């Protein structure tokens, strides 16, 4: 065990609900002032600064000085991935609703008129997560491309044929354990999206097609206008008719 990574320090930092609330507010890739993060977490400015100091010293946040103001953002994409993985694990391990602290990315007094980019489309490990991914998963089921039995996902002959027409070859995705796809729990949607090698291949296809891009250190993905249209058409009956 001497070569095992020490995760206890990070786990301790994220275990505090106030610190996790401030971390979650930065998951969209933004940089925020301490005063804003204090408001989000329900802390006094002095308490917020103390927590932010610990998160910065622990390597989870980096500080940007702009004139007399200090802004905080996630230190690296891996930090956002770790927080997101914990949110997914929370969803997978309990049937209870996700705590409100994991749902707020902006102050209650300033609700967003549209879903945040993080909720719409994001990296979930090596595949696509968010509303866009959950909708796509359901279309794949409805179109008969995949079948789900409990947590096991299988690719139908129809699905393999249609995916091959788009440059995704199921045989090339077969892992040593034979697991090509899985239903990954989506913490924001409370319904699955496509995980496993097939999920990664679909994300790669969308990225290479210019439909999605990763503009900064945030796990949030940018969806182009063309990408919005084409991904919503993916696996729809009208698209199937055009492809055959």
Image (cartoon, rainbow, N blue to C red):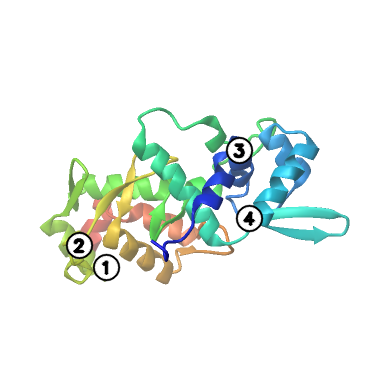
Task: Locate residue 59, reporting x and y percent.
Answer: 63, 58
Residue 113 disc label = 3
Sort mark 2 into few (<14), some (14-19) or many (20+) by Cα contacts within 10 Å: some
The image quarter in which residue 21 lies:
top right
Q: Nearer the viewer, mark 4 or mark 2?
A: 4
* Left or right: 115 as drawn, with respect to 133: right
* Left or right: 94 as drawn, with respect to 63: left
Label total for image: 4
Q: Which residue is mark 4?
A: 58
Q: CA separation, marks 4 and 2?
A: 47 Å
Q: Which residue is mark 1?
A: 166
Q: CA separation, marks 2 and 3?
A: 37 Å
Please indicate, yes or no, whether residue 103 appears anywhere in the rendered image: no
Sort mark 4 into few (<14), some (14-19) or many (20+) by Cα contacts within 10 Å: few
The image quarter in which residue 92 lies:
top left
Q: Which residue is mark 2?
A: 162
Asked if the residues shown at circle 2 and circle 1 are in contact, with their CB atoms under 8 angstroms apart, the answer is yes
In the image, residue 168 sits, relative to residue 94, either above or below, namely below
In the image, residue 60 sits, relative to residue 207, either above or below, namely above
Q: Secondary structure at mark 4?
A: loop
Q: Secondary structure at mark 1?
A: loop
């Amino acid at each position: 065990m001497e070569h095992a990574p020490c995760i206890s320090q990070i786990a301790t930092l994220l275990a505090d609900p106030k610190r996790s609330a401030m971390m979650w507010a930065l998951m969209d890739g933004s940089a925020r002032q301490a005063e804003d993060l204090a408001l989000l977490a329900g802390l006094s400015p002095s308490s917020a600064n103390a927590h932010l100091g610990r998160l910065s010293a622990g390597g989870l946040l980096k500080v940007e000085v702009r004139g007399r103001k200090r802004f905080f953002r996630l230190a690296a994409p891996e930090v956002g991935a770790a927080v997101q993985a914990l949110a997914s694990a929370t969803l997978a391990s309990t049937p209870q609703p996700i705590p409100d602290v994991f749902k707020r990315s902006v102050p209650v007094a300033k609700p967003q008129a549209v879903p945040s980019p993080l909720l719409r489309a994001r990296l979930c490990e090596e595949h696509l997560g968010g509303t866009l991914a959950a909708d796509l998963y359901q279309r794949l089921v409805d179109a008969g491309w995949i079948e789900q039995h409990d947590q096991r996902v299988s690719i139908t002959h129809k699905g393999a044929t249609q995916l091959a027409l788009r440059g995704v070859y199921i045989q090339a995705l077969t892992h040593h354990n034979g697991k090509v796809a899985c239903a990954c729990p989506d913490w924001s949607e409370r319904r699955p999206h496509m995980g496993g090698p097939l999920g990664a291949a679909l994300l790669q296809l969308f990225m290479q097609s210019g439909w999605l891009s990763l503009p900064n250190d945030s796990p949030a993905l940018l969806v182009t206008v063309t990408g919005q249209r084409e991904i919503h058409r993916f696996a729809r009956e009208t698209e199937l008719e055009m492809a055959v």
